Amino acid sequence: MNLSDATTFAAMYEQHRRGVYGAAYRIVQNAALAQDVTQDVFLRVWRNPEKFDQRRGELGSYLRLMARSRALDLWRESQAAGRATDRLKISVTHEPQKDERPDVEAERGESRHVVREALRDLPAAQREALVLAYWGGMTADEVARHVGVPLGTAKSRIRLGLTKLREGFEAAATPVAV
């Protein structure tokens, strides 16, 4: 089967598109995301038709496995983003539990306040990258894919955001001479 031939590819697409979409939809439970996964699977096959080896299995199984794998990646990213959002909401809106030692509690509260203020002062893109990376547990590559920017841009946003956070934290920690 020559998948680099446009006619063969079109016939293959017609034959397998529903199965690929179904495999993706079962995981992501979102029609738009399942369509994106389907497009991505067929685009990958079109770009690299030699990756499919008939000796290893049937084409439909290969395509559905690719769809399942990509859909799981998207699902995991969305789960990480959800955790990041939840953590940010908790850190910004909830008060910490009371400590038995008031001096420790006061110091923690002041540190939290400084971090929250520094986060609020960051540009939205840097704040989002930091939240996804540190509270969401995402890698820079995952942040880039989630936000839809190049990897270098995601890394720069994280680095610049950290630098500004550090500067804000240090400025707040420096005693003011009166």
Image (tube, grey):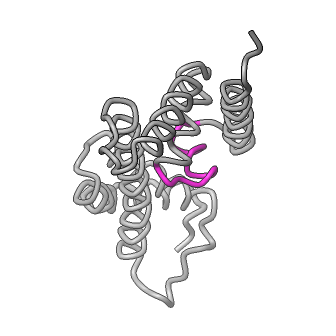
**Residue drawn at the location 57% of the way across and 69% of the way down:** 2
Is 167 placed above or below 8 here? above
* Side of 20 where 22 appears, left or right: left
Observer-nearest of 132 and 166: 166
* Side of 94 where 1 appears, left or right: right
Residue 175 place in picture, x, y as percent = 72, 23
Observer-nearest of 111 and 164: 111
* Side of 33 where 25 appears, left or right: left
Q: Quadrant of residue 23?
A: bottom left
Q: Residue furthest bottom?
A: 55
**Residue drawn at the location 39% of the way across and 48% of the way down:** 101
Q: Residue 144 magenta-drawn?
A: yes
Is 9 placed above or below 115 here? below
Is 89 placed above or below 145 here? above
Number of numbered discs overlaid on the protein picture: 0
Q: Main secondary structure of the magenta part?
A: helix
**Residue drawn at the location 69% of the way across and 38% of the way down:** 162
**Residue drawn at the location 43% of the way across and 52% of the way down:** 77
| Figure quadrant of the C terminus | top right
Residue 14 place in picture, x, y as percent = 34, 55
Q: Which residues are magenta?
A: 136-148
Observer-nearest of 75 and 175: 175
Residue 133 place in picture, x, y as percent = 56, 47
Q: Residue 49 magenta-drawn?
A: no
